[in-house]
Structure formats: structure tokens, C-alpha cells
Image (cartoon, grey):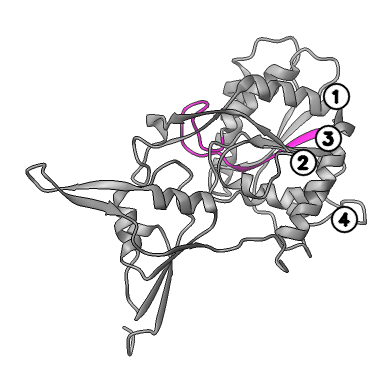
């Protein structure tokens, strides 16, 4: 119960929940990681005076939406398009925290390998190869690439299903084991699961760990992609997909951006927020296999470009900037 109407009302939520409570109303949203947003989201945006989102990719998706408005008889009565101004809120990384450490990392990670790929992200709903971060396919591709090899890297998954519980951790371990059993091999590389809450400082320690050599993500779509920006500040190679918001700060010249194609969302990932006809990115498995091997076998070739990406991120995507 407000004593009077606010001069400015700012609301951070999904757009269908935007309500114009103030004299001037600002809606803040990360948008959607696909090629489309629901009509209810456009309606919500149009109730506000200004919409702020986190990437040019998200902004463009809102701007491209154009729906037919039909009455109960199915007759077209008009078009539904975004009419509210939409802007991108610059999002940088805190370079006082995310940076190359001068002292050895104190984080004690119990892995035997000297070379590990790191993935950071949620493992959410979806059948194999259909979850948004594409963790299932990442695991399968890693096993297939390095099976039966005499010298193998490790894969560290800093992941959860969205919560930091023992049940969630056990569920992820089961999912890894199910994928492992589909690979026919005499020997397989090791995959390690890091589960639970980390502070920003601990995440930077993880990025700087001497055994963590590169970051990998086969993500199908990002509203921004914060872990990729954070990791880009520690002078190590990154291999990820060449579509959506993270390509706005990751240079194709300095990082490995893999090709693929846009495909419709699988029914197993659909929820109330997704548009059924929307698409997101499916990476080319052959490129995943190639770059997994090449970065591992020819690491120095990628280090110089990683240094240049760090310079770009530090100068163009810092909080000071």
C-alpha cells in the first residue's frame, strides 16, 4: 500500500508480469535465449514507458516480433508489435575480482590430470542434446573424442540443476553415468562434478587454477553469458557456439566460436515461457570433436589469442568501462 504513486517504478521480472505502477515505468528483463518471445511478453513491454534488456541479441528478438491479433471468429483485427523504446543495459565484469591472480590458486581440486576443460552452467530440463546449455551433448562429445587415448584431459562441470542440494548433485551424477554407459570404449577420460555455491572470488580461483586450461560451452542460446565473460579475463582459451549474446563480447578472432544451425526447440524443453515455433542453436558435432583435440594437442597455438581476448574484455567490458 504505497502512500502515493511513485514518480519512477522499475520492475525486474519476465515481461508478462510488468505492471505500470508509477508515473514513469521501467521494465527490466534478460529476454529469451531463442529466436522468439511470446505475445504476452510484448503486451507486457508495451505497458511500460521503457524496457531495459541485457544484450543486443535480446533487444533484436523483441523488436522483430510481429503477431496477428484475431477476434473470437478468427478474423485479423491488427498487429501486435513492440511500441515501447527498448535499450541494452551495459553489462561488464568486475575486473577487481575477475583477473589473472599473481599468487598460486588456493582452491584444492582433487583431480589427477594436468589439463582440464571447464564448463560452468545449469543443467536444466530437456532430453539428451536438447537442454539449453547442451550439457548432455558436451559430456558425450568429450567421452567420444578422448576414448581409448593414452593421454587424456579431464572435464570439470561446475554445474547444478538450479539448486544446491545433495539430491540435485546425485541426480546430475546419475545423468553423467547414463551418458557414460552409451559410449563403447576400453578406457574413458574422467569427468568431475563441482556442485554447490561458490563466491565470486572462489569462481575466479577456479578459473585461475593451474589445471583448468580452457572453458567449453555448447550453449544453444544466451541472454548474456556471464561465465564466458568472466573466464575471458584470465588469459585462457574459450571454445563455444557462434550464436546469441556472448558473441557480442567474444571475438571470433580470439576465441573458438563453433558453427552449427538453428533448430526448433524440442518438446522436452517447452514450458510456459517458450514459443513453440522458436529456434535456438545446435552446434556442429564434428567441430566440437576437432577443437577438443586441437586445443588439447596444440595449446600454445590458442594462448596468444586468449591473451588478446583478455585485453579486449578488460578494456571494453569492465565495470569502469
Q: Pointers 3 and 2 in contact (CB under 8 A)?
A: no
Task: Please name the residue shown 26% across and 52% down the image.
Answer: 80
Q: Pointers 2 and 1 in contact (CB under 8 A)?
A: no
CA neighbours of label 4 inside 10 A, class few (<14), some (14 to 19), many (20+): some
Magenta stretch: helix, strand or loop mostly? loop
Q: Is residue 240 left or right of residue 114?
A: left
Query: Label 3, on which residue?
Result: 302
Q: Is residue 125 magenta?
A: yes
User: Disc 4 on helix, strand or loop?
Assistant: loop
Q: CA distance from mark 2 to mark 1?
A: 18 Å
Query: Label 1, on which residue?
Result: 297
User: Disc 1 on helix, strand or loop?
Assistant: helix
Q: CA distance from mark 4 to mark 2?
A: 21 Å
Residue 187, image x, y percentages: 76, 14
Q: CA distance from mark 3 to mark 1?
A: 10 Å
CA neighbours of label 1 inside 10 A, class few (<14), some (14 to 19), many (20+): few
Residue 6, image x, y percentages: 37, 84
Q: CA distance from mark 4 to mark 3?
A: 20 Å
Image quarter of the C terminus: bottom right
Of the image marks 2 and 1, the number of the one nearer the N terminus: 2
Q: Which residues are magenta?
A: 114-133
Q: CA distance from mark 3 to mark 2?
A: 8 Å
Q: Is residue 201 magenta?
A: no
Q: Pointers 1 and 4 in contact (CB under 8 A)?
A: no
Q: Nearer the viewer, residue 2 or 32?
A: 32
Numbered tag placed on residue 254 in the rendering: 2
Amino acid at each position: 500500500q504505497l502512500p502515493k504513486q511513485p514518480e519512477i517504478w522499475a520492475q525486474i521480472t519476465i515481461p508478462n508480469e510488468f505492471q505500470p505502477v508509477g508515473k514513469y515505468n521501467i521494465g527490466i528483463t534478460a529476454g529469451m535465449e531463442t529466436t522468439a518471445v511470446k505475445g504476452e511478453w510484448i503486451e507486457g513491454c508495451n505497458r511500460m514507458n521503457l524496457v531495459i534488456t541485457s544484450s543486443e541479441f535480446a533487444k533484436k528478438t523483441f523488436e522483430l516480433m510481429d503477431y496477428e491479433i484475431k477476434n473470437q471468429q478468427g478474423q485479423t483485427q491488427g498487429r501486435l508489435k513492440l511500441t515501447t523504446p527498448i535499450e541494452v543495459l551495459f553489462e561488464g565484469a568486475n575486473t577487481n575480482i575477475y583477473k589473472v591472480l599473481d599468487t598460486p590458486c588456493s582452491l584444492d581440486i582433487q583431480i589427477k590430470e594436468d589439463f582440464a576443460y571447464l564448463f560452468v552452467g545449469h543443467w536444466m530440463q530437456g532430453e539428451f542434446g536438447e537442454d539449453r546449455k547442451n550439457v548432455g551433448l558436451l559430456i558425450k562429445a568429450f567421452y567420444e573424442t578422448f576414448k581409448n587415448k593414452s593421454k587424456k584431459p579431464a572435464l570439470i562441470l561446475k554445474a547444478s540443476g538450479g539448486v544446491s542440494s545433495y539430491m540435485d548433485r546425485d541426480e546430475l551424477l546419475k545423468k553423467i553415468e547414463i551418458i557414460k554407459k552409451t559410449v563403447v570404449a576400453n578406457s574413458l577420460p574422467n569427468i568431475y562434478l563441482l556442485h554447490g555455491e561458490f563466491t565470486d572470488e572462489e569462481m575466479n580461483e577456479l578459473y585461475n587454477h593451474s589445471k583448468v586450461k580452457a572453458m567449453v560451452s555448447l550453449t544453444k542460446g544466451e541472454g548474456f553469458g556471464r561465465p564466458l565473460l568472466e573466464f575471458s579475463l584470465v588469459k585462457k582459451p574459450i571454445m563455444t557456439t557462434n550464436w546469441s549474446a556472448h558473441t557480442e563480447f567474444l571475438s571470433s578472432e580470439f576465441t573458438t566460436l563453433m558453427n552449427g544451425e538453428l533448430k526448433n526447440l524440442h518438446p522436452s524443453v517447452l514450458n510456459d515461457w517458450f514459443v513453440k515455433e522458436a529456434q535456438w542453436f545446435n552446434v556442429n558435432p564434428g567441430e566440437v570433436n576437432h577443437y577438443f583435440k586441437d586445443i588439447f594437442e596444440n595449446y600454445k597455438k590458442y594462448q596468444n589469442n586468449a591473451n588478446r581476448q583478455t585485453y579486449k574484455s578488460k578494456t571494453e567490458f569492465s565495470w569502469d568501462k
